[in-house]
Protein backbone atom coordinates (compact mmCIF):
# COMPACT_ATOMS: atom_id res chain seq x y z
CA UNK A 1 0.00 0.00 0.00
CA UNK A 2 1.20 3.47 -0.82
CA UNK A 3 2.16 5.36 2.37
CA UNK A 4 1.25 8.75 0.91
CA UNK A 5 -2.38 7.74 0.35
CA UNK A 6 -2.79 7.48 4.12
CA UNK A 7 -0.27 10.02 5.44
CA UNK A 8 -1.34 13.09 3.42
CA UNK A 9 -5.06 12.99 4.34
CA UNK A 10 -4.13 12.35 8.00
CA UNK A 11 -1.73 15.29 7.93
CA UNK A 12 -4.40 17.56 6.42
CA UNK A 13 -6.95 16.51 9.04
CA UNK A 14 -4.35 16.98 11.77
CA UNK A 15 -3.57 20.51 10.55
CA UNK A 16 -7.25 21.41 10.47
CA UNK A 17 -7.87 20.02 13.98
CA UNK A 18 -4.79 21.81 15.35
CA UNK A 19 -5.87 25.09 13.76
CA UNK A 20 -9.37 24.74 15.23
CA UNK A 21 -8.20 23.98 18.77
CA UNK A 22 -5.51 26.66 18.84
CA UNK A 23 -7.09 29.53 16.90
CA UNK A 24 -10.76 28.59 16.40
CA UNK A 25 -12.40 29.95 13.21
CA UNK A 26 -9.57 32.25 12.11
CA UNK A 27 -7.06 29.39 12.34
CA UNK A 28 -9.36 27.05 10.46
CA UNK A 29 -9.84 29.70 7.76
CA UNK A 30 -6.07 30.28 7.46
CA UNK A 31 -5.22 26.57 7.14
CA UNK A 32 -8.17 25.99 4.80
CA UNK A 33 -7.05 28.89 2.61
CA UNK A 34 -3.52 27.52 2.49
CA UNK A 35 -4.80 24.08 1.49
CA UNK A 36 -6.98 25.57 -1.25
CA UNK A 37 -3.99 27.56 -2.56
CA UNK A 38 -1.87 24.38 -2.60
CA UNK A 39 -4.61 22.54 -4.51
CA UNK A 40 -4.95 25.37 -7.04
CA UNK A 41 -1.18 25.43 -7.65
CA UNK A 42 -1.16 21.70 -8.43
CA UNK A 43 -4.26 22.00 -10.63
CA UNK A 44 -2.68 24.86 -12.59
CA UNK A 45 0.50 22.83 -13.16
CA UNK A 46 -1.49 19.83 -14.35
CA UNK A 47 -3.53 21.89 -16.80
CA UNK A 48 -0.42 23.70 -18.12
CA UNK A 49 1.41 20.40 -18.76
CA UNK A 50 -1.63 18.93 -20.51
CA UNK A 51 -2.10 22.03 -22.73
CA UNK A 52 1.53 21.84 -23.85
CA UNK A 53 1.23 18.11 -24.52
CA UNK A 54 -1.95 18.62 -26.54
CA UNK A 55 -0.02 20.67 -29.13
CA UNK A 56 2.43 17.85 -29.94
CA UNK A 57 2.08 14.47 -31.65
CA UNK A 58 1.66 11.48 -29.34
CA UNK A 59 4.94 9.72 -28.61
CA UNK A 60 7.21 12.42 -30.06
CA UNK A 61 10.20 13.99 -28.26
CA UNK A 62 12.79 16.48 -29.52
CA UNK A 63 15.73 14.25 -28.50
CA UNK A 64 15.40 10.70 -27.18
CA UNK A 65 19.05 10.74 -26.06
CA UNK A 66 18.46 13.84 -23.90
CA UNK A 67 15.31 12.28 -22.43
CA UNK A 68 17.32 9.17 -21.62
CA UNK A 69 19.90 11.32 -19.80
CA UNK A 70 17.27 13.26 -17.81
CA UNK A 71 15.16 10.33 -16.61
CA UNK A 72 15.47 9.19 -13.00
CA UNK A 73 13.80 6.32 -11.13
CA UNK A 74 10.77 7.34 -9.06
CA UNK A 75 9.71 10.30 -11.25
CA UNK A 76 5.95 10.36 -11.92
CA UNK A 77 4.27 10.28 -15.33
CA UNK A 78 3.21 13.93 -15.13
CA UNK A 79 6.84 15.00 -14.69
CA UNK A 80 7.95 12.90 -17.69
CA UNK A 81 5.10 14.39 -19.75
CA UNK A 82 6.29 17.87 -18.73
CA UNK A 83 9.88 17.01 -19.78
CA UNK A 84 8.85 15.65 -23.18
CA UNK A 85 5.94 18.08 -23.73
CA UNK A 86 4.12 15.13 -25.30
CA UNK A 87 1.98 12.22 -24.21
CA UNK A 88 3.76 8.90 -24.63
CA UNK A 89 2.72 6.21 -27.08
CA UNK A 90 1.05 3.55 -24.93
CA UNK A 91 2.57 0.08 -25.38
CA UNK A 92 0.82 -1.79 -22.56
CA UNK A 93 -2.88 -2.62 -22.37
CA UNK A 94 -5.24 -0.22 -20.60
CA UNK A 95 -5.07 -0.71 -16.81
CA UNK A 96 -2.20 -3.21 -17.00
CA UNK A 97 0.69 -2.92 -14.55
CA UNK A 98 3.47 -2.08 -15.26
CA UNK A 99 2.57 0.62 -17.76
CA UNK A 100 4.89 1.11 -20.75
CA UNK A 101 5.17 4.23 -22.90
CA UNK A 102 7.47 5.14 -25.79
CA UNK A 103 8.77 8.49 -27.03
CA UNK A 104 10.53 8.68 -30.43
CA UNK A 105 12.54 11.51 -32.02
CA UNK A 106 12.96 12.44 -35.70
CA UNK A 107 16.20 10.44 -36.00
CA UNK A 108 14.49 7.15 -35.16
CA UNK A 109 15.86 6.86 -31.62
CA UNK A 110 13.28 6.01 -28.98
CA UNK A 111 13.00 5.68 -25.22
CA UNK A 112 10.65 3.09 -23.73
CA UNK A 113 9.74 3.89 -20.12
CA UNK A 114 8.20 1.43 -17.66
CA UNK A 115 6.02 2.88 -14.90
CA UNK A 116 5.10 0.92 -11.79
CA UNK A 117 2.43 2.60 -9.68
CA UNK A 118 2.66 5.76 -11.77
CA UNK A 119 6.41 6.20 -11.19
CA UNK A 120 9.40 5.45 -13.43
CA UNK A 121 10.74 1.99 -12.72
CA UNK A 122 13.02 1.46 -15.74
CA UNK A 123 13.71 2.85 -19.20
CA UNK A 124 15.51 1.72 -22.32
CA UNK A 125 17.05 3.74 -25.17
CA UNK A 126 16.87 2.20 -28.64
CA UNK A 127 18.92 3.78 -31.42
CA UNK A 128 18.78 2.85 -35.12
CA UNK A 129 21.73 0.95 -36.54
CA UNK A 130 24.49 3.02 -38.15
CA UNK A 131 23.76 1.62 -41.62
CA UNK A 132 20.05 2.55 -41.25
CA UNK A 133 21.01 6.11 -40.32
CA UNK A 134 23.40 6.33 -43.30
CA UNK A 135 20.70 5.16 -45.70
CA UNK A 136 18.09 7.59 -44.36
CA UNK A 137 20.36 10.67 -44.57
CA UNK A 138 20.45 12.52 -47.92
Image (cartoon, rainbow, N blue to C red):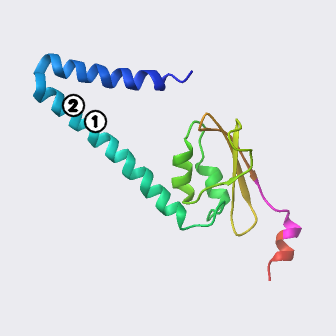
Which circle marks residue 83 in the picture? none
The residues tagged by marks 2 and 1 sit, at their Cα atoms, a distance apart of: 6 Å
**At x 21% / y 31%, what residue is drawn?**
31
Q: Which residue is mark 2?
A: 31
Query: What secondary structure is found at the residue carrying circle 2?
Result: helix
**At x 84% / y 74%, what residue is drawn?**
134
Q: Quick check: is 130 in the magenta stretch?
A: yes
Q: Is residue 131 left or right of residue 49?
A: right
Specify start and end residues of the magenta stretch as a single range: 126-132
Residue 22 % position (x, y): 13, 18
Please say if 63 is above or below 34: below
Residue 44 % position (x, y): 37, 52
Residue sitting nearer the eye, 103 or 27: 27
Residue sitting nearer the eye, 74 or 57: 57
Query: What secondary structure is found at the residue carrying circle 1?
Result: helix
Please say if 67 is above or below 105: above
**At x 86% / y 69%, what residue is drawn?**
132
Please say if 124 is above or below 3: below
Q: Which residue is mark 1?
A: 35
Residue 112 % position (x, y): 72, 49
**At x 18% / y 22%, what residue is drawn?**
19
Tell me the quarter of the image containing the N terminus: top right
Tell me the quarter of the image containing the C terminus: bottom right
Kindly indicate whether the residue at mark 1 contacts the one at mark 2 (C-beta within 8 angstroms): yes
Q: Is residue 138 left or right of residue 46?
A: right
Amino acid sequence: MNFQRIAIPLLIIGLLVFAWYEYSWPGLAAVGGGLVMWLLLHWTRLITVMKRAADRPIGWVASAVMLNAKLKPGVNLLHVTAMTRSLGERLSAEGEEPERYRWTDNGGSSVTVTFQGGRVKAWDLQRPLAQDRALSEP
